[in-house]
Amino acid sequence: MGKYKKDVLSDLRRYESTISHEVTHAVRDAMTGNVSRHVERAQKDRTVAEGYRDRGHLDLEFEVDATMSAIATLKRRMRRKWDLMTFKDVEKHLRGTKLPEPGDSAFKKWVGRMNREGLLSRAMREEFRG
């Protein structure tokens, strides 16, 4: 395999979770139009846009769906290390995607969803219990 091909494959693997996140948004938007309507409203209403900066968007169902897709992709990629990964480790690997903090209102909802989808590592379960 040539060096160029290796570089391209390496870049794709590095951004695999981000691609999965955005594709999930695109599919949901194609089916419902919810994402487009929310983005249009955010562009008009400054408070909605500011909510994205301080994690206010983490309660939005389409954002939860997209992030769960990204986390599932990350879990497949990090299979051997998954049970050691904490919420902060996952957030670091998701490049720009924020997860709810333990004190956030959305945190418990996210943990439940991750549990249903088999995405909680042993370390995350311990964090949640503690």
Image (spheres, rainbow, N blue to C red):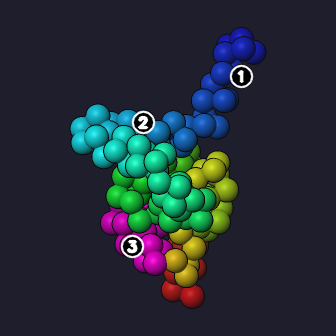
**Residue 86, relative to residue 104: is it above or below?**
above
Q: Secondary structure at mark 2?
A: helix
Q: Which residue is mark 1?
A: 7
Q: Which residue is mark 2?
A: 23
Q: Which residue is mark 3?
A: 109
Q: How many marks?
A: 3
Residue at 34% in and 44% down = 37
* Front in this rendered view, residue 5 or 100: 100
Q: CA distance from mark 1 to mark 3?
A: 38 Å
Mark 1 touches mark 3? (CB < 8 Å): no
Residue 94 place in picture, x, y as percent: 60, 50
Residue 71 located within the stretch drawn in magenta: no
Other-residue count near label 1 (Cα within 10 Å), few / some / many at <14 / 14–19 / ≥20: few
Mark 2 touches mark 1? (CB < 8 Å): no
**Residue 97, relative to residue 23: is it above or below?**
below
First in sequence: mark 2 or mark 1? 1
Which residue range is magenta in the image? 105-120
What is the quadrant of the C terminus in the image?
Answer: bottom right
Residue at 75% in and 15% down = 3
Q: Is residue 119 left or right of residue 83?
A: left
- Farthest left residue? 31
